[in-house]
Image: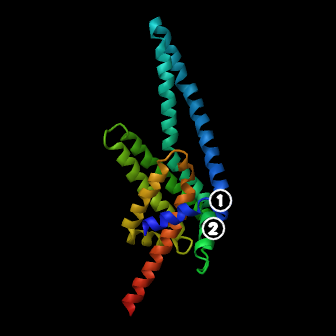
Amino acid sequence: MIFDAARAAASQLFSPAFRGAFLKTLGLTLLILVALWFGLREAFDIYAMPWLDALLPGLPSWAGWLGLIAAIIAGVGLALALALLVAPITAIVAGIFLDDVAEAVEKESYPQDPPGKAVPLLPAMILSLKFLGVVIVGNIIALMLLFVPGVNLIAFFIINAYLLSREFFEFAAMRFRSEADAKALRRRHAGTVFLAGFVIAAFLAVPLLNLLTPLFAAAMMVHLHKMISARERVLSRGATA
C-alpha cells in the first residue's frame, strides 16, 4: 500500500495536471530558501563577524589563516541550518498548496469518487502554524543530536517521518472528514502512516529533489488516504455481512 501510494505520487509529479501546483510550490519554496539564506548570512555578518574581527588582531600574524577556516565553517554551518529548515518550510508550503495538489490527484486518479472539500482558510492556517511549531522543535532536537555518532541520521529520519506523515495525512483526510475524524483515522493506522513518512523523509534527504517534498508528500498521502478508506469500507462491509 505504501509503495503503491509513493509510486502513484511520483508518476504524477511532472504530469500536466500538476504543472500549476508544481510551479507554485517550487517557486515559493525557492523564494523562502533564498530569503532565509540571505537572512542567515546577514545575521552572521552582524553578530559573528565583529567578534571574529576583534579576535584576529590579537593573534600572531602566522595565524591569519584562522579567518579563512572560520569563513569555511560559517558557510558549512549556514548550509546545514538551511538544510534543517527545509522540513519546516515544507509545512508552510503544504498549508498553502495542499488543496491544489489534492484536487489534481483526485481528478486524475479518482474521477469516479466525490471530490474532497478544501479545508477552510482559517482552520488550515491555524493547523499549519501549530504544526510548524512542532516541526521546528523536532528539528531542533535533531540538530542537538547531530553530533552524536550513529544517532544523528536516525533522529533526522524518525522525527521527520513522524511529523511530516502526520501533517500531510491529516490534511488529506480533512478534505473528506472532520478534524477529529481525520486524527482518529490516523491513530487507527498509525503504523502505516508512520512508515509512509519514512518515504517522505527519504525524499526530503535528497538535495534539490527535496524542494518538491510538499508536492510529493501531499500527492502520496491523498493516495494513501484513499487506499486506507477503501480498505476500511471493505472490512466494514465484511463485518456486517
Q: Is residue 113 above or below residue 85?
A: below
Q: Secondary structure at mark 2?
A: helix
Say few, some or many: other residues with alpha carbon within 10 Å of mark 1 (under 14 / 14 to 19 / 20 or more): many
Q: Is residue 67 above or below residue 105?
A: above
- Alpha carbon of mark 2 to alpha carbon of mark 1: how far? 9 Å
For label 2, the residue is 104
Residue at 48% over, 31% down = 76
Can you give x and y, in whole percent of width and height, for residue 160 in the image? 43, 52
Q: Quadrant of the N terminus?
A: bottom left
Label at residue 45: none
Residue 134 seen anywhere in this rendered image of the structure: no
Residue farthest along the bottom direction in this orientation: 241
Q: Quadrant of the C terminus?
A: bottom left
Can you give x and y, in whole percent of width and height, for residue 90 in the image? 54, 52
State which tag comes first along the sequence, 2 or 1. Answer: 1
Residue at 51% over, 36% down = 79
Residue at 62% over, 69% down = 103
Residue at 59% over, 68% down = 105
For label 1, the residue is 21
Residue farthest along the top direction in this orientation: 61
- Could you tell me the amino acid type at mark 2? Ala
Which one is nearer the viewer's eye here, 10 or 78?
Answer: 10
Say few, some or many: other residues with alpha carbon within 10 Å of mark 2 (under 14 / 14 to 19 / 20 or more): many
Q: Secondary structure at mark 1?
A: helix
- Could you tell me the amino acid type at mark 1? Ala
**Contact flag, marks 2 and 1 (Cβ < 8 Å):** yes
